[in-house]
Image: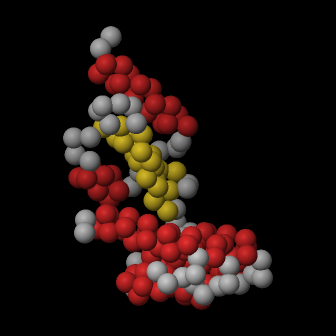
Amino acid sequence: MNRWCQTTRRGVLTGLALLVAFPVSADTPLQQAVREQLRGECYLLVEDQDGARLFVFSTGSVTAVTARRPAKTSSRQVEEALIMTRSADTRTRVRGLTLLSGVDDPAALDAALVLFSDPAAAVREEAVQLIIEHPDADVASIAEIASRDPSDRVRQASAELISERSDDWGD
Protein backbone atom coordinates (compact mmCIF):
# COMPACT_ATOMS: atom_id res chain seq x y z
CA MET A 1 0.00 0.00 0.00
CA ASN A 2 1.48 3.36 -0.99
CA ARG A 3 2.02 6.25 1.42
CA TRP A 4 -0.92 8.31 0.11
CA CYS A 5 -3.37 5.43 0.73
CA GLN A 6 -2.01 4.90 4.23
CA THR A 7 -2.32 8.60 5.00
CA THR A 8 -5.84 8.74 3.60
CA ARG A 9 -6.90 5.66 5.55
CA ARG A 10 -5.53 7.09 8.82
CA GLY A 11 -7.27 10.41 8.13
CA VAL A 12 -10.58 8.72 7.40
CA LEU A 13 -10.33 6.54 10.52
CA THR A 14 -9.48 9.57 12.64
CA GLY A 15 -12.38 11.50 11.14
CA LEU A 16 -14.81 8.66 11.77
CA ALA A 17 -13.60 8.32 15.35
CA LEU A 18 -14.12 12.04 15.90
CA LEU A 19 -17.60 11.93 14.40
CA VAL A 20 -18.56 9.10 16.72
CA ALA A 21 -17.00 10.82 19.74
CA PHE A 22 -18.59 14.26 19.28
CA PRO A 23 -22.10 15.34 18.31
CA VAL A 24 -21.81 17.37 15.10
CA SER A 25 -23.84 20.48 14.33
CA ALA A 26 -21.58 23.12 12.77
CA ASP A 27 -23.31 26.38 11.92
CA THR A 28 -23.45 27.49 8.28
CA PRO A 29 -21.39 30.75 8.59
CA LEU A 30 -18.61 28.82 10.32
CA GLN A 31 -18.68 26.10 7.65
CA GLN A 32 -18.48 28.74 4.90
CA ALA A 33 -15.58 30.56 6.55
CA VAL A 34 -13.63 27.32 7.00
CA ARG A 35 -14.40 26.24 3.43
CA GLU A 36 -13.09 29.57 2.08
CA GLN A 37 -9.94 29.59 4.23
CA LEU A 38 -8.99 25.93 3.71
CA ARG A 39 -9.87 25.48 0.06
CA GLY A 40 -7.97 22.42 -1.21
CA GLU A 41 -7.00 21.18 2.27
CA CYS A 42 -8.27 18.08 4.07
CA TYR A 43 -10.07 19.06 7.25
CA LEU A 44 -12.80 18.03 9.65
CA LEU A 45 -14.97 20.59 11.44
CA VAL A 46 -16.70 19.48 14.63
CA GLU A 47 -18.86 21.66 16.88
CA ASP A 48 -20.02 20.65 20.36
CA GLN A 49 -21.03 22.27 23.65
CA ASP A 50 -17.43 23.45 24.23
CA GLY A 51 -17.17 25.30 20.92
CA ALA A 52 -15.85 24.28 17.52
CA ARG A 53 -12.84 22.14 16.68
CA LEU A 54 -11.11 22.28 13.34
CA PHE A 55 -8.84 19.37 12.51
CA VAL A 56 -6.55 20.01 9.54
CA PHE A 57 -4.84 17.01 8.03
CA SER A 58 -1.65 17.84 6.14
CA THR A 59 -0.87 15.90 2.96
CA GLY A 60 2.71 15.05 3.95
CA SER A 61 1.76 13.29 7.16
CA VAL A 62 -1.23 12.71 9.35
CA THR A 63 -1.05 15.76 11.55
CA ALA A 64 -4.10 17.28 13.11
CA VAL A 65 -4.15 20.86 14.30
CA THR A 66 -7.02 21.86 16.53
CA ALA A 67 -8.37 25.38 16.61
CA ARG A 68 -11.04 26.10 19.20
CA ARG A 69 -13.69 28.77 19.03
CA PRO A 70 -14.96 29.87 22.43
CA ALA A 71 -18.34 28.50 23.35
CA LYS A 72 -21.14 30.93 24.07
CA THR A 73 -21.08 31.95 27.71
CA SER A 74 -24.26 32.67 29.64
CA SER A 75 -24.65 35.91 31.60
CA ARG A 76 -24.76 33.84 34.80
CA GLN A 77 -21.38 32.26 33.97
CA VAL A 78 -19.94 35.70 33.23
CA GLU A 79 -21.23 37.04 36.56
CA GLU A 80 -19.72 34.09 38.44
CA ALA A 81 -16.38 34.59 36.68
CA LEU A 82 -16.46 38.32 37.49
CA ILE A 83 -17.06 37.51 41.16
CA MET A 84 -14.05 35.16 41.04
CA THR A 85 -11.85 37.99 39.73
CA ARG A 86 -12.57 39.91 42.96
CA SER A 87 -11.42 37.06 45.22
CA ALA A 88 -8.60 37.43 47.73
CA ASP A 89 -7.14 34.14 46.45
CA THR A 90 -4.68 34.45 43.54
CA ARG A 91 -5.69 31.15 41.92
CA THR A 92 -9.35 32.10 42.02
CA ARG A 93 -8.63 35.45 40.34
CA VAL A 94 -6.63 33.66 37.62
CA ARG A 95 -9.44 31.13 37.15
CA GLY A 96 -11.99 33.94 36.88
CA LEU A 97 -9.95 35.62 34.14
CA THR A 98 -9.52 32.29 32.37
CA LEU A 99 -13.28 31.78 32.37
CA LEU A 100 -13.74 35.28 30.92
CA SER A 101 -11.31 34.61 28.08
CA GLY A 102 -13.12 34.87 24.76
CA VAL A 103 -16.07 36.74 26.26
CA ASP A 104 -16.80 39.96 24.34
CA ASP A 105 -18.59 41.53 27.30
CA PRO A 106 -17.13 44.94 28.29
CA ALA A 107 -17.25 43.81 31.94
CA ALA A 108 -14.70 41.09 31.11
CA LEU A 109 -12.34 43.70 29.68
CA ASP A 110 -12.91 45.97 32.70
CA ALA A 111 -12.07 43.13 35.11
CA ALA A 112 -8.89 42.36 33.21
CA LEU A 113 -7.86 46.02 33.17
CA VAL A 114 -8.33 46.22 36.95
CA LEU A 115 -6.28 43.05 37.46
CA PHE A 116 -3.57 44.26 35.08
CA SER A 117 -2.03 45.94 38.15
CA ASP A 118 -2.53 42.95 40.49
CA PRO A 119 0.40 42.15 42.82
CA ALA A 120 0.52 38.52 41.56
CA ALA A 121 2.38 37.98 38.26
CA ALA A 122 0.16 35.02 37.34
CA VAL A 123 -2.91 37.26 37.55
CA ARG A 124 -1.27 40.02 35.49
CA GLU A 125 -0.20 37.45 32.90
CA GLU A 126 -3.75 36.12 32.53
CA ALA A 127 -5.11 39.69 32.45
CA VAL A 128 -2.72 40.59 29.61
CA GLN A 129 -3.89 37.57 27.64
CA LEU A 130 -7.57 38.44 28.07
CA ILE A 131 -7.00 42.10 27.22
CA ILE A 132 -4.97 41.41 24.09
CA GLU A 133 -7.56 38.93 22.82
CA HIS A 134 -10.54 41.19 23.57
CA PRO A 135 -11.92 42.93 20.44
CA ASP A 136 -12.38 46.30 22.22
CA ALA A 137 -8.92 46.48 23.80
CA ASP A 138 -6.30 49.11 23.09
CA VAL A 139 -3.63 46.52 22.33
CA ALA A 140 -0.82 49.00 21.60
CA SER A 141 -1.17 50.70 25.00
CA ILE A 142 -1.39 47.41 26.85
CA ALA A 143 1.66 46.04 25.03
CA GLU A 144 3.62 49.16 25.96
CA ILE A 145 2.67 48.91 29.64
CA ALA A 146 3.22 45.13 29.75
CA SER A 147 6.70 45.52 28.23
CA ARG A 148 7.71 47.35 31.44
CA ASP A 149 6.17 44.81 33.83
CA PRO A 150 8.58 43.64 36.58
CA SER A 151 7.79 39.99 35.79
CA ASP A 152 9.61 38.23 32.94
CA ARG A 153 6.56 35.95 32.55
CA VAL A 154 4.23 38.88 31.92
CA ARG A 155 6.63 40.58 29.49
CA GLN A 156 7.21 37.33 27.60
CA ALA A 157 3.50 36.43 27.48
CA SER A 158 2.65 39.87 26.18
CA ALA A 159 5.31 39.73 23.46
CA GLU A 160 4.19 36.24 22.37
CA LEU A 161 0.51 37.21 22.28
CA ILE A 162 1.21 40.38 20.30
CA SER A 163 3.31 38.35 17.86
CA GLU A 164 0.56 35.73 17.46
CA ARG A 165 -2.07 38.41 16.97
CA SER A 166 0.13 40.15 14.36
CA ASP A 167 0.50 36.84 12.52
CA ASP A 168 -3.28 36.35 12.59
CA TRP A 169 -3.76 39.82 11.11
CA GLY A 170 -1.13 39.16 8.48
CA ASP A 171 1.06 42.09 9.58
Q: Residue at x 29, y 56 (%)?
A: 33
| Image side of residue 30 versus residue 81, left or right | left
Query: Quarter of the image containing the C terminus?
Result: bottom left
Q: Residue at x 43, y 81 (%)?
A: 143
Q: Quadrant of residue 139?
A: bottom left
Q: Is 168 above or below relative to 28?
A: below
- Could you say which is closer to the camera, residue 36 or residue 31? 36
The count of marks equals: 0
Q: Residue at x 39, y 71 (%)?
A: 162
Coordinates of residue 20 in the picture (x, y in percent): 52, 34
Coordinates of residue 125 in the picture (x, y in percent): 57, 74
| Image side of residue 74 versus residue 25, left or right | right
Q: Residue at x 55, y 72 (%)?
A: 152
Residue 136 visible at all: no
| Image side of residue 127 versus residue 167, left or right | right
Coordinates of residue 67 in the picture (x, y in percent): 43, 53
The colour scheme applied to this rendered structure is secondary structure
